Image (cartoon, grey):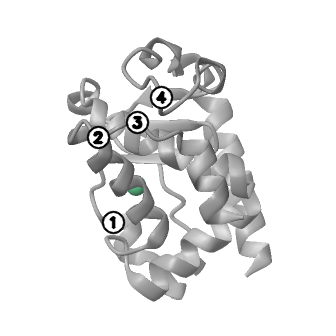
Amino acid sequence: MSNLVAKIENWIDEVLESHCEQMVPCKPFASYFDGYFSEKFLANCFYVVAPELPKPDFPELRDAGFGSFIDDDHAGITYKNCYFIKAEQEDNLYLHLHELVHVSQWHILGAEKFIATYMDELLKYGYEDAPLEQMAKAFEYNYATQADPVNVIDALRDELT
Ligand SMILES: [Zn+2]
């Protein structure tokens, strides 16, 4: 499994490198996400608008049961401090917030642990019920209902460490 995680991380680094010119800074979201993410944190977050969300389509991932995750159409996907979304979602603040929660998870867990945990959860719970997805949805809900803002990094540090 650890070889596979390393292979995915290498693939991610190549994807990020090949999209660096299309990366849009998230810092302008600071006023929308006040209380959720600091300006300092957002200054190191980026997104890319892509016609297809890049996913690692390795035969060994399909053999291990990740075929439906690879084939399913998702609204966004986060790799390290950068997430990929489709053009029609670019104005969807809930999705930006959701993906920024994933950036926070990557940041707190580190790449290797994020990838391994996310894969375990996909197999054990499925995409919808995966705890890392549930956390992102909970913040999305909090934001949508205009509840008091919760600092995402602080809250996740408590939850994940
Ligand atoms: Zn998600």
Q: Is residue 125 above or below residue 107?
A: below
Q: Earlier in the sequence, mark 1 or mark 3?
A: 1
Q: Is residue 13 above or below residue 137?
A: above
Q: Which label sits on residue 38?
A: none
Do tag 4 and tag 3 residues touch (Cβ < 8 Å)?
yes
Name the side, left or right, on which 70 lies relative to 4. Answer: left
Q: CA distance from mark 4 to mark 2?
A: 11 Å
Q: Nearer the viewer, residue 76 or 93?
A: 93
Q: Which label sits on residue 71?
A: 1
Name the side, left or right, on which 6 lies relative to 82. Answer: right
Q: Position of residue 141 (x, y in %)?
A: 27, 49
Residue located 66% across and 72% down the image:
116
Do tag 1 and tag 3 residues touch (Cβ < 8 Å)?
no
Do tag 2 and tag 1 residues touch (Cβ < 8 Å)?
no
Residue located 39% across and 44% down the image:
98
Amino acid, disc 4:
Gly
Q: Position of residue 74 (x, y in %)?
A: 30, 54
Q: Foreground mark, 4 or 1?
A: 4
According to the image, label 4 marks what residue?
A: 35
Q: Foreground mark, 1 or 3?
A: 3
According to the image, label 2 marks what residue?
A: 147
Q: CA distance from mark 4 to mark 3?
A: 5 Å
Question: Crowding near pointer 3: few (<14 within 10 Å), some, many (20+)?
Answer: some
Q: Is residue 91 above or below residue 101?
A: above
Q: CA distance from mark 1 to mark 3?
A: 34 Å
Amino acid, disc 2:
Ala
